[in-house]
Structure formats: structure tokens, C-alpha cells
């Protein structure tokens, strides 16, 4: 049994928890606390303080896992390992997240992206249990893509940035030029929450289920599913997030993904309109914190 602390560090808030784990059963945090994301120094100090409080109740901590917004430096051979790199979040570029927490808590600290963490959590205890490879996609304020193969989150030159996949836009159907400051009409630039609001003038949460923008979003996410299938060949794709969990959206995504796949790949997993291939999270909104606990378990 190990005593694991976990932090899901988001751009607006951090969720802090801890659990006694055996590595097999889904962990049940003894408590969770929510901390506003302000400056790096204040936010990380409050996260460390919260974990020290939880550790007192558990008799100590063996390790901590962090699933963080990014981009992150995840190559241990490069300067700034475990810190945030180029980010639009004011004041957070260069923040040494891992080092700050390791120094404050005196235990091993493992860190990965928030979406890689969510992918890991869904693989251990959620909608992708028992699979060798899967992808987790979060669609909300931005779009993130986490990839797990053989039970391990994937890194390469950097970590996956599938939210910036280039997709095809029919300018007659969708004249909106895109929200992304780097690429304009990439996937995130067309299908994230702020892009929807900028296109129609209302927050996505205020739109009815039959608003035509949802079919556009379903098409762009369907293109993403087809591209991920063609390039990575995952056994399942899990789609979550505030926009990703919109009722009826996954049905549209499956429809358009099936259309874009075009019958090229013949596999039983793609039968029944992709209902078993494109799925919602099994852990609901708890994927990220579960992934942070999994990272901490591995570090311990």
C-alpha cells in the first residue's frame, strides 16, 4: 500500500487530493480541495500546504503525481524538466512545477500533461481498461489529446498536441476563420468553446441541442477521430470535457468520423456506428485526478 498525493493543475483551478492505494483498485481520495490558479508561487504553495494537511491524516506521503496544463517540458535531459514552457497563461511560462513541489514536500513528484493524465486514469480505471492503446480527448476551453500505449503516456520530441491538428473547413458552410492565434482554423481554432462562442456570439452552454454549430463541431471532431485512427490506430478514443460532454455531440462525432473513414478500415471495433470506439469517459470528471494518482503510484 502506498500513500499518494495528486494534483490536477488547471488554468483556472487546481484540484488536490490524496489516497491510500494498492495499484489495482480504483483509488478513493480521502478528500479533495479546490484552489484557484493565481500566480505560480501562490498556487503551488497552497497545493503543497493542502497536501501536507492530507499527509498528516494519512501518516505521510510516498509520492505525488501532477497532471498539469501546459505545454510542459517532459524530457528529463533538458533544462526546465517538469516545468511549464511557452503558455498563454500570464506569469506561468517557465514555472518549475515539479521542482517546486518536490522541494516543498520532500517526496518523488511525477508530472505529465493534464490530458495525458486523464488518458492514464481512463486506462487504469475507466473507459479504456484492458486495452493496450487508447486516446483521451478533452474538448473545452481548448482541445487536448493524450495518448497511452502499453499503459504509458506517450512523449516524443514533445508531448502530443493533437488539438492543433489541421482539419478541412468548407468556407461556404463555415466562414469563421478560427480562434487559434497560431494556426487560425486548426481543430482547436474551430471546435473549442471560445471558438463556438466567437462564431455564434453566445456561449456554447447557452445553445440549444439542435443549433447548426453542433454539426460543424461534430464534423471537425469526426475528422480528428479519423486522423487519429489512421495515424495511431488506437483501440479506443475517449472524448470528455465541457464541450465534449455536450448531450448528442458524440453521436454527431461518430457519424462524421464514419463518413471520413470512408470504409477504408474494416474491423469489428468500428461496427455499430463506432459506438464502442468513440466513447465518453468512464470516470466522468474525475479522469484527471485519477491520472495524477496513477502518476504518483508509478513514481512511488
Image (spheres, rainbow, N blue to C red):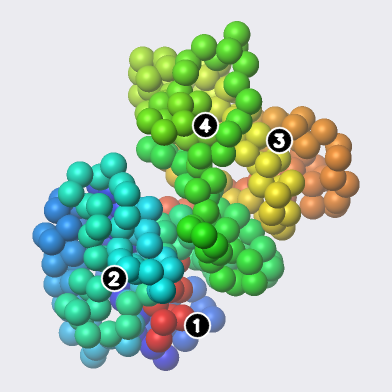
Viewed as shown, does residue 259 lie left or right of 284?
A: right
Q: Which of marks 1 and 3 is nearer the N terminus?
A: 1
Where does the N terminus fall, quadrant-wise?
A: bottom left
| Residue 124 vertical placement versus 256 (above, below) | below
| Residue 155 vertical placement versus 296 (above, below) | above
Secondary structure beneath disc 3?
A: helix
- Viewer-nearest of labels 1 and 3? 3
Q: Residue 90: in sight, yes or no?
A: yes
- Residue, disc 3: 257
Secondary structure beneath disc 1?
A: loop
The image shows residue 191 at horizontal and vertical percentages of 49, 30
| Residue 44 vertical placement versus 209 (above, below) | below
- Viewer-nearest of labels 2 and 3? 2
Q: Work out how far the residue at label 2 is from the one at label 1, CA to CA, in angstroms.
A: 22 Å
Furthest-left residue in this view = 42
What residue appears at the point 85 percent right and 52 percent down from the top-left corner?
268
Q: In which quarter of the image is residue 257?
A: top right
Q: Earlier in the sequence, mark 2 or mark 4?
A: 2
- Residue, disc 4: 186
Residues at discs 4 and 1 in contact (Cβ within 8 Å): no
- Viewer-nearest of labels 2 and 1? 2
Q: Which of marks 2 and 1 is nearer the N terminus?
A: 1
Say which mark, if any, is on residue 98.
2
Q: Quadrant of residue 40?
A: bottom left
Q: Quadrant of residue 54?
A: bottom left
Q: Earlier in the sequence, mark 2 or mark 3?
A: 2
Viewed as shown, does residue 269 lie left or right of 147?
A: right
- Residue, disc 1: 23
- Frontmost residue, 33 versus 52: 52
Say which mark, if any, is on residue 5.
none
Where does the C terminus fall, quadrant-wise?
A: bottom left
- Frontmost residue, 271 versus 91: 91
Amino acid at each position: 500500500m502506498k500513500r499518494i498525493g495528486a494534483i490536477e493543475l488547471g488554468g483556472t483551478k487546481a484540484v488536490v487530493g490524496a489516497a491510500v492505494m494498492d495499484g489495482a483498485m480504483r483509488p478513493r481520495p480521502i478528500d479533495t480541495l479546490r484552489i484557484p490558479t493565481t500566480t505560480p508561487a501562490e498556487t503551488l504553495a497552497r497545493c503543497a500546504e493542502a497536501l501536507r494537511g492530507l499527509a498528516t491524516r494519512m501518516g505521510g506521503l510516498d509520492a505525488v503525481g501532477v497532471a498539469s496544463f501546459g505545454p510542459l517540458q517532459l524530457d528529463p535531459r533538458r533544462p526546465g524538466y517538469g516545468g511549464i514552457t511557452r503558455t498563454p497563461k500570464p506569469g506561468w511560462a517557465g514555472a518549475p512545477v515539479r521542482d517546486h513541489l518536490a522541494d516543498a514536500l520532500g517526496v518523488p513528484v511525477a508530472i505529465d500533461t493534464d490530458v495525458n493524465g486523464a488518458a492514464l486514469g481512463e486506462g487504469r480505471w475507466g473507459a479504456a481498461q484492458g486495452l493496450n492503446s487508447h486516446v483521451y480527448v478533452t474538448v473545452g476551453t481548448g482541445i487536448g489529446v493524450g495518448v497511452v500505449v502499453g499503459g504509458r503516456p506517450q512523449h516524443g520530441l514533445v508531448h502530443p498536441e493533437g488539438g492543433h491538428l489541421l482539419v478541412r473547413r468548407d468556407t461556404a458552410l463555415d466562414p469563421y476563420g478560427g480562434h487559434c492565434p497560431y494556426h487560425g482554423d486548426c481543430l482547436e481554432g474551430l471546435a473549442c468553446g471560445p471558438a463556438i462562442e466567437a462564431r455564434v456570439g453566445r456561449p456554447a452552454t447557452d445553445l440549444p441541442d439542435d443549433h447548426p454549430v453542433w454539426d460543424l463541431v461534430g464534423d471537425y471532431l469526426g475528422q480528428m477521430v479519423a486522423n487519429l485512427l489512421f495515424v495511431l490506430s488506437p483501440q479506443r478514443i475517449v472524448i470528455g470535457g465541457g464541450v465534449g460532454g455536450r448531450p448528442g455531440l458524440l453521436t454527431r462525432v461518430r457519424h462524421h468520423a464514419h463518413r471520413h473513414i470512408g470504409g477504408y478500415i474494416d474491423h469489428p471495433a468500428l461496427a455499430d456506428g463506432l459506438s464502442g470506439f468513440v466513447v465518453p469517459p468512464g470516470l466522468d470528471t474525475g479522469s484527471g485526478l485519477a491520472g495524477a494518482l496513477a502518476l504518483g503510484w508509478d513514481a512511488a
